[in-house]
Image (cartoon, rainbow, N blue to C red):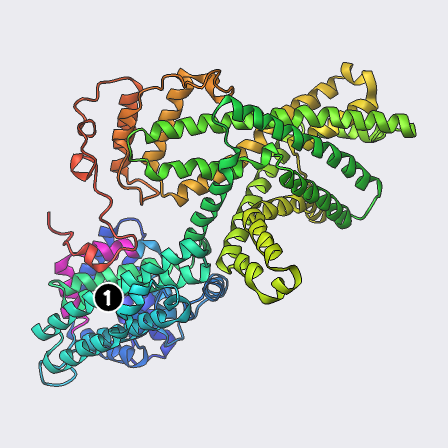
C-alpha cells in the first residue's frame, strides 16, 4: 500500500473495527520491510511532510483521533499493560496461554488487546527508540496536539490527565500488594513498623491535587513528586525484606511473582512521572511506548514467565542441593577410601535390586504395573542405601555440582578461583571412587546370587534368551548411549524434585508441626515426635530424591512405550549387574563372544554419560542461581584447563600425602574476574574484550599493561559498563537524543 492510498482510506465515520484496521495498516506501512529502524523513521518524516500540506486530511485526522480517544481509554495501557489481571502465577500462565493460542480482534475498545495488534513485532521497539527529538516534536504538534480540557492553562491536558489516572491506578495496585497478608506478614519487623505502604495513597493524591490546582508541570507538583519517589523507595526496601524471610523459611513462586509485579509497577510509576515532568517529555513517552511494545512481546513468552518467577526458587533448590552435596565430596585419601566403602555398600544393595528386577520381569505384568513394580523396587533400594549411609555414584553429580558452584559466592576473594579448581578435582575424584565402589561390588554380588540360585534351583538368575537380550541391549553401538544420557536427565530431575520438596517442607514448617502439633505429640509422645521431626528435616531431601528417581526409572520407560517413543533407561550400576547375570548364564562362551565385550564397552560408556549429563544440567542451574556471567565462566574454564595440564592425575586419584602439591598461579584470572555478575549474557564489546584477554593469557603474553593487572576492577578500566542499564529498561534510561552525537 502506498502512502497516498493509505491517507485516502482514513474515515472518521467508519465502524470501530475499520478504524482500528486503518491504524494497523498505517503502522505496517511505517515498518516497511522491518529491517532498518532508520528507514521507518524516514517514513514517519515522509508522512509528516505530506500531511502538513493537506489541511483537509488533517481535519479528518483530528476528527478520527478525537473519536478514537472517546471510544478507547488509554489509561489501562499505561497502568495495567504487562501486569497479570490477578497477581498469581497460575493466573498469568493461563492468560499467556490464551494469548498465544487464541487470535485477537481489532473490534475492541480495550487498548491492552488492541496494542498487541498495533505493535506486534520486536522491530517496533527498535524504530520507536530510533525516533529523534525533532521528529517526536513534529509528530506531537502535527498529529497529536493536545489542548487543556478547559480554557485555564493550569488545567491538565487530556494526555496529562490520563497520566495522572494511570499513576493513581498503579499506586493503588502497589499499595494493595504491600497490604496483602502473605507479603505483609513476611516483611521484617522494622519495615512493618514503618508502615511504608500506608502513606502511598495519601502522597499520590497530593500529586493529583497539586496538578489540578497548579498545573501538571508546576513547581508544587515537582515537590510532591519528589516526596512520592522517596516514599516509593521506602516501599521498595520494605518489599525486599520479604526475600530474607523466603530465604530462611522457604520460597513460594506465588509470592516471588507478586513481588516481581510490585517492583515492575514501581518502575512503571517512575516512567509515568518521567512522561509528565521530564525535560523532554516526548522522548520519555516514546521510550515508554517502546518498553510497552517490548513488554507485549515478552508477555507472550511462557518460558520467560517461568524463568522470572522460578529464579529464586531455582537458587534455593540449588542451595538445598549444595547442602546435601557437601557430604559426597572427598578431599583427602582417608575420605577417598571412605567413599569407596560407601559406594561398595551401595553396589551390594543394588546387586539385590538387580535380582528383584529380574523377578519382576518374570511376573509378566502389564506395562504400567511392571513399570510401577520396577520403580517401587528401585525406590526401596535407594532409600535403603540412604538409611544405611551408603551411596550411588550416579546420584551424586546433581547435588555435588551446586555444592561446587556455591564456592563461587565469594569468588572475588584472593585464592577463591584456586579453591574452586581444587573443588572440581575433589569432585571428579569422588565420582571415580563412587563408580569403582558401585561396579566393583555389584558384579560379584550378582555373580554370587546367580551361582547360589543355580546350585539351589538348577537355574541361574535369568534364562539364556534373556541373557542374550541383555547383552544385545547394552551394545556400545546401539541406543545405550542415548538412553544413558536420558537417564542423566532423570537423575537431574530427581535432584530438582528433592530441592523443591525440601523447600516446600521448610516453607510450611512441617518439622515444627511434627514436633509440636498436639495430634502428633499425643500419638508419638514428645520425645519421639521431636526425633521424627529431626529425622524428616535431615532426610526429606534424600527421601524425595530417591523415591522420585526410583519411580521415574521404572515408570518413564512404561509411559514412553505407551506413546511409542522407545525410550529406556541405562544406569551404570544396574547395567553392570545385569551384564554380570547374563555372563553367569552364558558361561565361558561369553568370554569369546565379541558381542559380550561390546556390551562391556557399553557399560563403560554408560557411567560417564550418566555423570556428565546430570552434572552439566545441575552445574548450569547452579551457575544461573549464582548469577555467573559468560565472561567469568570463560575464566573458570581457563583455570580448569591450567590445572588439567599441570596436575592431570589429581582429577582421578587422591593425594598420596596430606600435603597438597603446589598449585598453579591463577592470580591473573582472579584479577580479570568482572564485577558485573548480574548479567547472564555479554554485549559484543565485552565479549571481544574477554576473548582477547583469554587469548593473551593462554599464549602467556605479558599482562603488565592491562589495567586489570593493576587492580582496577571496574568499568573505568576499559571494560564497557554494563551494570548501569536497568534490567527492564525505562524512560529514564533513554533520555539521550539519538540524533545528537
Tell me: residue 699, above or below residue 509.
above
Q: Mark yes or no: residue 606 visible.
A: no
Q: Please tell me whether residue 710 belongs to the stretch shown in magenta.
A: no
Q: In the image, 83: left or right of 506?
A: left
Q: Nearer the viewer, residue 138 or 232?
A: 232
Q: For residue 118, which quarter of the picture?
A: bottom left
Residue under numbered circle 1? 232
Q: In the image, 129: left or right of 514?
A: left
Number of disc labels: 1
Name the residue: 31% across, 72% down. 175
Give the image location of residue 548, x and y in percent: 62, 47
Q: Please tell me whether residue 129 belongs to the stretch shown in magenta.
A: yes
Q: In the image, 448: left or right of 71?
A: right
Q: Mark yes or no: residue 702 visible.
A: yes
Q: Nearer the viewer, residue 321 or 625?
A: 321
Give the image location of residue 722, x and y in percent: 24, 44
Q: In the image, 198: left or right of 476?
A: left
Name the residue: 59% across, 34% down. 394
Give the image location of residue 204, x and y in percent: 22, 75
Q: For residue 55, which quarter of the picture?
A: bottom left
The span picked out in magenta is 125-145
Amino acid at each position: 500500500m502506498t502512502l497516498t492510498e493509505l491517507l485516502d482510506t482514513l474515515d472518521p465515520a467508519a465502524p470501530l473495527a475499520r478504524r482500528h484496521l486503518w491504524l494497523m495498516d498505517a503502522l505496517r506501512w511505517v515498518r516497511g520491510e522491518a529491517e532498518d529502524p532508520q528507514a521507518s523513521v524516514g517514513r514517519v518524516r515522509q508522512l509528516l511532510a505530506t500531511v502538513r500540506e493537506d489541511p483537509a486530511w488533517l481535519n479528518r485526522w483530528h476528527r478520527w483521533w478525537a473519536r478514537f480517544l472517546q471510544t478507547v481509554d488509554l489509561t489501562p495501557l499505561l497502568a495495567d499493560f504487562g501486569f497479570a489481571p490477578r497477581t498469581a502465577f497460575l493466573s498469568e500462565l493461563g492468560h499467556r496461554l490464551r494469548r498465544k493460542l487464541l487470535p485477537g480482534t481489532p473490534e475492541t475498545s480495550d487498548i491492552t488487546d488492541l496494542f498487541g495488534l498495533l505493535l506486534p513485532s520486536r522491530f517496533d521497539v527498535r524504530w520507536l527508540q530510533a525516533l529523534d527529538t525533532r521528529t517526536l516534536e513534529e509528530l506531537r504538534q502535527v498529529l497529536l496536539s493536545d489542548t487543556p480540557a478547559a480554557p485555564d492553562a493550569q488545567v491538565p491536558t487530556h494526555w496529562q490527565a490520563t497520566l495522572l489516572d494511570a499513576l493513581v491506578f498503579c499506586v493503588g495496585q502497589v499499595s494493595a500488594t504491600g497490604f496483602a497478608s502473605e507479603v505483609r506478614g513476611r516483611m521484617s519487623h522494622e519495615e512493618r513498623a514503618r508502615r511504608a505502604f500506608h502513606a502511598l495513597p495519601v502522597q499520590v493524591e497530593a500529586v493529583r491535587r497539586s496538578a489540578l490546582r497548579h498545573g501538571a508541570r508546576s513547581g508544587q507538583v515537582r515537590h510532591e513528586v519528589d516526596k512520592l519517589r522517596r516514599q516509593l523507595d521506602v516501599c521498595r526496601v520494605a518489599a525486599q525484606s520479604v526475600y530474607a524471610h523466603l530465604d530462611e523459611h522457604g520460597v513460594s513462586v506465588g509470592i516471588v511473582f507478586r513481588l516481581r509485579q510490585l517492583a515492575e509497577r514501581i518502575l512503571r510509576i517512575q516512567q509515568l512521572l518521567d512522561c509528565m515532568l521530564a525535560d523532554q517529555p516526548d522522548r520519555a513517552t516514546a521510550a515508554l511506548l517502546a518498553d510497552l511494545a517490548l513488554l507485549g512481546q515478552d508477555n507472550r513468552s511462557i518460558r520467560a514467565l517461568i524463568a522470572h518467577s522460578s529464579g529464586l526458587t531455582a537458587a534455593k533448590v540449588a542451595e538445598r542441593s549444595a547442602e546435601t552435596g557437601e557430604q559426597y565430596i572427598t578431599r583427602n585419601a582417608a575420605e577417598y577410601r571412605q567413599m569407596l566403602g560407601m559406594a561398595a555398600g551401595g553396589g551390594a544393595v543394588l546387586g539385590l535390586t538387580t535380582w528383584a528386577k529380574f523377578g519382576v520381569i518374570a511376573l509378566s505384568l502389564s506395562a504400567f504395573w511392571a513399570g510401577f513394580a520396577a520403580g517401587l523396587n528401585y525406590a526401596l533400594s535407594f532409600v535403603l542405601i540412604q538409611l544405611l549411609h551408603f551411596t550411588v555414584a550416579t546420584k551424586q553429580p546433581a547435588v555435588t555440582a551446586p555444592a561446587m558452584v556455591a564456592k563461587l559466592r565469594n569468588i572475588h576473594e584472593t585464592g577463591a578461583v584456586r579453591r574452586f579448581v581444587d573443588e572440581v578435582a575433589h569432585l571428579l575424584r569422588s565420582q571415580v571412587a563412587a563408580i569403582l565402589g558401585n561396579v566393583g561390588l555389584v558384579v560379584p554380588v550378582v555373580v554370587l546370587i546367580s551361582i547360589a540360585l543355580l546350585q539351589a534351583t538348577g537355574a541361574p538368575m535369568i534364562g539364556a534368551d534373556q541373557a542374550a537380550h541383555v547383552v544385545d541391549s547394552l551394545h556400545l553401538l546401539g541406543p545405550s548411549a542415548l538412553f544413558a544420557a536420558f537417564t542423566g536427565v532423570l537423575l537431574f530431575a530427581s535432584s530438582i524434585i528433592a530441592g523443591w520438596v525440601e523447600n516446600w517442607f521448610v516453607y510450611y514448617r512441617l518439622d515444627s508441626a511434627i514436633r509440636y502439633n498436639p495430634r502428633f505429640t499425643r500419638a508419638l509422645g514428645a520425645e519421639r515426635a521431636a526425633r521424627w521431626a529431626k529425622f524428616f528435616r535431615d532426610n526429606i531431601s534424600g527421601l524425595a530424591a530417591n523415591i522420585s528417581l526410583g519411580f521415574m526409572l521404572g515408570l518413564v520407560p512404561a509411559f514412553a512405550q505407551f506413546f511409542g517413543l522407545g525410550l529406556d533407561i541405562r544406569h551404570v550400576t544396574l547395567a553392570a549387574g545385569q551384564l554380570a547375570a547374563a555372563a553367569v548364564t552364558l558361561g565361558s562362551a561369553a568370554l569369546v563372544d565379541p558381542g559380550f565385550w561390546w556390551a562391556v564397552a557399553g557399560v563403560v560408556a554408560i557411567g560417564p554419560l550418566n555423570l556428565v549429563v546430570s552434572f552439566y544440567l545441575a552445574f548450569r542451574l547452579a551457575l544461573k542461581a549464582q548469577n555467573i556471567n559468560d565472561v567469568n565462566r570463560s575464566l573458570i574454564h581457563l583455570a580448569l584447563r591450567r590445572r588439567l595440564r599441570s596436575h592431570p592425575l589429581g582429577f582421578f586419584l587422591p593425594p598420596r600425602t596430606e600435603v597438597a602439591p603446589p598449585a598453579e598461579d591463577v592470580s591473573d584470572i582472579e584479577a580479570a574476574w568482572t564485577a558485573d555478575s548480574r548479567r547472564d549474557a555479554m554485549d559484543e564489546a565485552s565479549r571481544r574484550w574477554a576473548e582477547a584477554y583469554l587469548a593473551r593469557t593462554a599464549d602467556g603474553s605479558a599482562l603488565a599493561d592491562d589495567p586489570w593487572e593493576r587492580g582496577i576492577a571496574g568499568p573505568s578500566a576499559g571494560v564497557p559498563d554494563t551494570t548501569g542499564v536497568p534490567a527492564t529498561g525505562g524512560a529514564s534510561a533513554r533520555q539521550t537524543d539519538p540524533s545528537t552525537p
